[in-house]
Amino acid sequence: MSEKRVEVFVPRGSDRADPNLFVGINGVNFLLPRGKKSMVPETVAAEIKRSELASDRFFESMDSMKNSGN
């Protein structure tokens, strides 16, 4: 992966969460420390963003299902 690198910040997780974020794309793996900035290829930054959006949508959906039962 020889592409432009961009800076990303991976927020800290809970006390029980892994201290690193694992990202794998097409057989290339990255282990990024939580709570710090890292320089990564643009595709890795895009995958992190996609994953965060998917997680947000999941929790929004769960909240919606909880509230519809009231």
Image (cartoon, grey):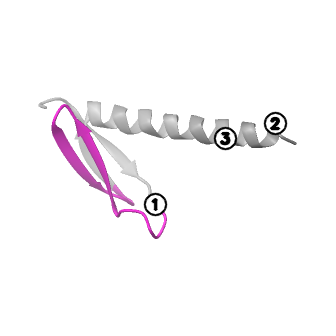
Q: Earlier in the sequence, mark 2 or mark 3?
A: 3
Q: Which residue is mark 2?
A: 68
Q: How many residues crowd around disc 1 within 10 Å: few (fewer than 14), some, or many (20 or more)?
A: few
In magenta segment, residue 18: yes
**Residue under numbered circle 1:** 13
Q: Are marks 3 and 1 in contact (CB under 8 Å)?
A: no
The span from disc 2 to disc 3 (Cα, nearest Å) is: 10 Å
Q: Residue at x 80, y 41 (%)?
A: 67
* Quadrant in which the N terminus is drawn: top left
According to the image, label 3 marks what residue?
62
Q: The magenta stretch spans which residues?
A: 13-36
Number of callouts: 3
Front-lying residue, 70 or 42:
70
The amino acid type found where label 2 is placed reads Ser
Residue 54 place in picture, x, y as percent: 50, 34
- Local SS, label 2: helix
Separation of marks 3 and 1 at Cα, in angstroms: 20 Å
Q: Secondary structure at mark 3?
A: helix
Q: Quadrant of residue 63?
A: top right
The earlier-in-sequence mark between 1 and 2 is: 1
Horizontal side of residue 47 vs 40, given as left or right: right
x, y (%) of residue 50?
43, 32
* In this rendering, position of residue 38 left or right of residue 66: left
